[in-house]
Image (cartoon, grey):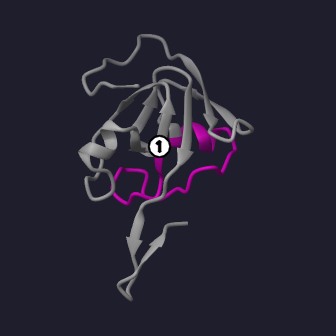
Amino acid sequence: MNNNYNASTPEAPQRHRIELADEQTCFNASSEHSVLVAMERAGQALIPVGCRGGGCGKCRIRILKGEYFSKRMSRAWVSPEQEAEGTVLACRVYARSDLTIEPDPPEIATSCGTADRAS
C-alpha cells in the first residue's frame, strides 16, 4: 500500500478497477477522479456520500490492497495511525493501481451521547 502525499498526477489518466472486499462488486476509476466520484459516475451506491470535501467522515473506507494517493482530510474521522493502516475518506483518495476496499463508516456520537455506526 502506498499513500504518497507528494505523488504527481500522471500525465495521462489511467483506469483502475476498484473492488469491494466481497469480491462481487466493482467499478472502474480514472486516476484523475477520487474513488467517491468514480463510484458515483459508475452509478454505484456502495459508499455513503456526505460533504465530498474530507470533512464529514461519511465516506470512510479501508483500502485492503493497492496503491493510492490521498489529499488532506479531517483528522476528526481519520487519525494518522488509521491512515497508515489504510483507512481514508473516499472523497480524498485517488487510485494509482487496482484497489480492494471496504466501507468503514466512523463512530459518530448521537445527541444522547451514545455512539452509533454511520449509515
Q: Residue furthest right?
A: 24
Magenta stretch: dominant SS? Answer: loop
Q: Nearer the viewer, residue 66 or 42?
A: 66
Quick check: 102 left or right of 57? right
* Kind of residue indicated by mark 1: Arg
Q: How many numbered markers are drawn?
A: 1
In this view, 43 is above or below 110:
above
The residue labelled by disc 1 is 62
Question: Residue shown at 53%/41% (left/top)?
Answer: 37
Queried whether the magenta region covers residue 53, the answer comes back as: yes
The N terminus, quarter of image: top left
Q: Name the secondary structure under disc 1.
A: strand
Residue 116 lies, in percent from the top left, at 47, 74
For the point 48% across and 11% down, the residue is: 12
Q: Residues within 10 Å of mark 1 (few under 14, many from 20)?
A: many
- Name the foreground residue: 116 vs 35: 116
x and y percentages locating residue 34 in the rendered image: 47, 36
Q: Residue at x 27, y 44 (%)?
A: 81
Q: Is residue 45 magenta?
A: yes
Q: Is 10 placed left or right of 24 in the picture?
A: left
**Nearer the observer, 111 or 82:** 82
Residue 61 x %, y % = 48, 46
Displayed quadrant of residue 68: top left
Span highlighted in magenta in the image: 36-62
Image position of 36 (left or right of 114): right
The quarter in which the C terminus is drawn is bottom right
